[in-house]
């Protein structure tokens, strides 16, 4: 399904291991957030998209501000063409753009299709030829995608929160630095 929709916009699709930019971070810089999530998540009902966004996604993006001087736009509207409009939950502008959206009903596949269309719309709206990175997340599972040229690549790997939080941060900071 994702592949068919991407082809309709004139883009190619691949599903492979992405070489994502990474940086080395002080492990202690993430440990407090990880420990807090491990301690408190069992006490929170994460049965809605809004709950996952508030208790999993937002704290991670908020923590990014400790590492980078970035702007995080929420509920960012896209309206490029009739078929390319919608709302990006989080848009982070840096040297590259990083789009973060939540998957609907914990469905990463449908979420990735939405992400791919949003990456295409962002590339056209900004008339940018630089690679764009995106993430689809259910809050506890994060999957990266990349638009480069006329190709969208979906990463084979998933990153889990809180267990892969350090690795997730090394990638997020690496992409945005």
Image (cartoon, helix red, strand yellow):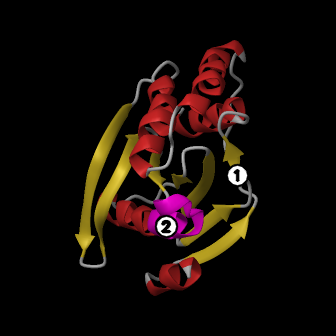
Eye-nearest disc, 1 or 2: 1
Residue 108 part of the magenta segment: yes
* Residue of label 2: 116
**Residue drawn at the location 68% of the way across and 21% of the way down:** 25
Give the quarter of the image for residue 17: bottom right
Q: Is residue 172 above or below residue 102?
A: above
- Measured as percent of width and height from the top left, residue 127 is found at 34, 61
Q: Is residue 67 above or below residue 107?
A: above
**How crowded is the residue under tag 1: few (<14 C-alpha within 10 Å), some, or many (20+)?**
some
Which comes sooner in the sequence, label 1 or label 2? 2
Q: Is residue 79 above or below residue 54?
A: below
Give the quarter of the image for residue 78: bottom left
The magenta stretch is 104-115
Dominant SS type (magenta): helix
Quadrant in which the C terminus is drawn:
top right
Q: What kind of element bears circle 1?
A: loop
**How crowded is the residue under tag 2: few (<14 C-alpha within 10 Å), some, or many (20+)?**
many
Q: Is residue 54 visible?
A: yes
**Residue drawn at the location 64% of the way across and 20% of the way down:** 30
**Residue drawn at the location 40% of the way across and 29% of the way down:** 70
Quadrant in which the N terminus is drawn:
bottom right
- Measured as percent of width and height from the top left, residue 62 is found at 44, 27
- Measured as percent of width and height from the top left, residue 35 is found at 66, 19
- Distance from the alpha carbon under mark 1 to that under mark 2: 17 Å
Q: What kind of element bears circle 2?
A: helix
Residue 66 part of the magenta segment: no
- Measured as percent of width and height from the top left, residue 120 is found at 42, 67
* Residue of label 1: 158
Q: Is residue 134 above or below residue 79?
A: above
Task: Please state which of residues 160 and 143 is positioned toward the viewer in this rendering.
Answer: 160
């Amino acid at each position: 399904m994702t592949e068919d929709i991407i082809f309709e916009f004139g883009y190619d699709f691949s599903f492979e291991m992405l070489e994502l930019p990474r940086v080395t971070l002080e492990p202690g810089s993430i440990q407090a957030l990880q420990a807090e999530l491990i301690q408190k998540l069992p006490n929170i009902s994460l049965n809605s998209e809004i709950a996952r966004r508030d208790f999993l996604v937002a704290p991670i993006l908020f923590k990014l501000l400790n590492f980078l001087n970035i702007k995080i736009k929420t509920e960012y509207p896209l309206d490029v063409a009739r078929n390319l409009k919608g709302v990006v939950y989080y848009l982070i502008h840096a040297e590259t753009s990083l789009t973060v959206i939540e998957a609907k009903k914990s469905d990463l596949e449908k979420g990735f299709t939405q992400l791919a269309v949003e990456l295409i719309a962002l590339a056209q709206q900004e008339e940018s030829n630089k690679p764009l990175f995106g993430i689809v997340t259910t809050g506890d599972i994060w999957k990266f995608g990349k638009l480069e040229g006329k190709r969208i690549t979906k990463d084979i790997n998933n990153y889990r929160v809180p267990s892969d939080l350090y690795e997730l941060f090394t990638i997020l900071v690496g992409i945005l630095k």
